[in-house]
Amino acid sequence: SGQQQFSEIRLNQVGFYPEGAKKAVVPGKASGNFYITTPNLSDTLYTGNLGAELKSLHSGKTTRVADFSTFRQSGTYVLLVPGQGYSYPFEVSQEVYQEMTKAAIKAFYFQRASTDLEEEHAGQWSRPAGHPDNKVLVHASAASKKRPEGTVLACSKGWYDAGDYNKYIVNSGITTATMLSAYEDFPVYFNTLNLQLPESNNTLPDVLDEALWNLRWMLTMQDPEDGGVYHKLTTANFEGMSTKPSEASAPRYVVKKSTAAALNFAAVMAQASRVFRKYDKEMPGFADSSLVAAKAAWKWARKNPAVLYDQSEMNKQYAPAINTGAYGDKDVSDEFDWAATELYLATKDDSYYKAIKAMPHKSMDLPSWGQVRFLGYFSLARHEKELTPAAKKNYPKLKAALIAFADQLVQAGEKTPYKVPMGGNAHDFVWGSNAVAGNQGIALVQAYRLTKNKKYLDSALANLDYLLGRNATGYSFLTGFGDKTPMFPHHRLSVSDGVKEPVPGLLVGGPNPGQQDDCTYPTKIADESYVDEECSYASNEIAINWNAPFLYLASALEALKYE
Ligand code: 9MR
């Protein structure tokens, strides 16, 4: 019965900053007082009153908020509602998110391909190397004169995309960019962070060492002949769920070059050239060669502006058929804008800026693997002081649009029954909805940076609360953190390693009423469409592009609390 009582009250299961907002959500009919007590329920330290009854947009279910923001005493507590039971124990402390944030960054290390993970760095999740990717085959769809079908390429390193073992340029691009942006925005925080990586003893911040693992792979995906970039590196079919990396032996291919891949590559390589410039001594030539690679990819994309990746069309023409993730974006106008922006910032050459179609674009869309315009906008805001007159002229409009976007999120958060921006829009619950929550958090942090108005930061923190338990499922969606947290993610590394606990620090996809897998879900209600089972790749897979916004959000909050 303890379990029953625990699961009813929803709150951030990791805990709260002493100075931060603190809210729990109580579902059902309870009203009246709530209490903050010691975990053994013996001492009551705070008494509050449950708020007004709220109704979910998605389920129609009613909830009330327990707001105990003014309770600031460090310690471990439970929240008690008579007749409703008590919450999981939670902590109030200035350090409450320290380990969790580190784990969310370290998770990328666990996704590394082509390397042994030593016990010293990986603990019980250590493993022998898999996917050396030093003998990757050029697929028929990617054959060129100099590189005919079957040509052997070396494309080692990189991160596994998700629960599968493939490596996709489009998704890698946005992920790496988000990680580099976190560093660009909060260098002081990252400069001292020790993630216990094999590279932790070098002079680079660990987060940049981690980003480099993927950047080095990305660079191998460019054809030096023409600057084009292969869409992905993949097996023909997904490997079995219990195949260990070291046992995986299916041939790996690079497939067809695409415009989206070239532009994602161009954008992130241009950003990398900017970020790594100051490490020219440690990595001679890296910044320069990244920029050269970015320009070559941009040129290819301008010459080939509409080579969309359509896997089923491709499979009609070429063998073997490729049946893994497509990341088949049908509109690359945002990719053009993003790449142009990053190249402009890396070179200050106005001709790149002039290539941007609209500034700002009339539709302001949250980042996702297929929608990357905001990444360029955030970069412009970040480098506001360095803009040339051409870009400076438009900047006030962009800034106003970014703030207006964040205002909508804040307003949505006031209306949702969980008092979080996430879920304020019926379309928030897509495949990988937890990345929507994370990316909303980034947009809010950006607005805070632009205005220094704390309401944006509070709202960003509310989405962290959402991800760590204040949501309709009652799960804390980051593996290894919280009391009710995914144990069975769709993640081959976790399934195949024989360790009970999944690899820690990974964010699962989250509620997705699309339910595009063959799992049995508890309900069709949007914000509850989640199931902690291995079969559920549509709600319980993990993915690098979902972890990256979480990494950004958590790091930003950690960095900013000291301001
Ligand atoms: O995140 C992707 C989601 O937006 C798509 O709807 C879905 C189906 O195409 O694919 C998701 O990405 C998966 C990728 O294709 C392969 N690796 C696992 C990714 C996460 O599920």
Image (tube, rainbow, N blue to C red):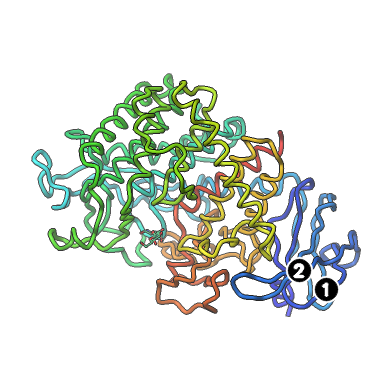
Assess whether mark 1 and mark 2 are in contact (beta carbons under 8 angstroms). yes
Quadrant position of ligand 1: bottom left
Q: Amino acid at mark 2?
A: Arg
Q: Around disc 2, counting alpha carbons within 10 Å, would you say few (fewer than 14), some (14 to 19), or many (20 or more)?
A: many
Marks 2/1: CA distance? 8 Å
What is the number of callouts on the image?
Answer: 2
Q: Nearer the viewer, residue 265 or 196?
A: 265
Q: Position of residue 499 (x, y in %)?
A: 50, 63
Name the residue beneath numbered marker 1.
31
Residue displayed at 21% across by 51% down: 255
Tell me the quarter of the image containing the N terminus.
bottom right
Mark 2 C-beta closer than 8 Å to ligand 1: no
Q: Position of residue 325 (x, y in %)?
A: 32, 59
Q: Position of residue 392 (x, y in %)?
A: 50, 25
Q: Would residue 541 appear left or right of 459 to someone viewing this image?
A: left
Q: Would residue 61 appear left or right of 379 to someone viewing this image?
A: right
Q: Quick check: 194 above or below 44?
A: above
Residue displayed at 39% across by 28% down: 344
Q: Secondary structure at mark 1?
A: loop
Q: Secondary structure at mark 2?
A: strand
Residue displayed at 10% across by 38% down: 146
Q: Give the quadrant of residue 213.
A: top left
Name the residue beneath numbered marker 2.
64
Q: Residue furthest top?
A: 281
Q: Nearer the viewer, residue 488 or 52?
A: 52
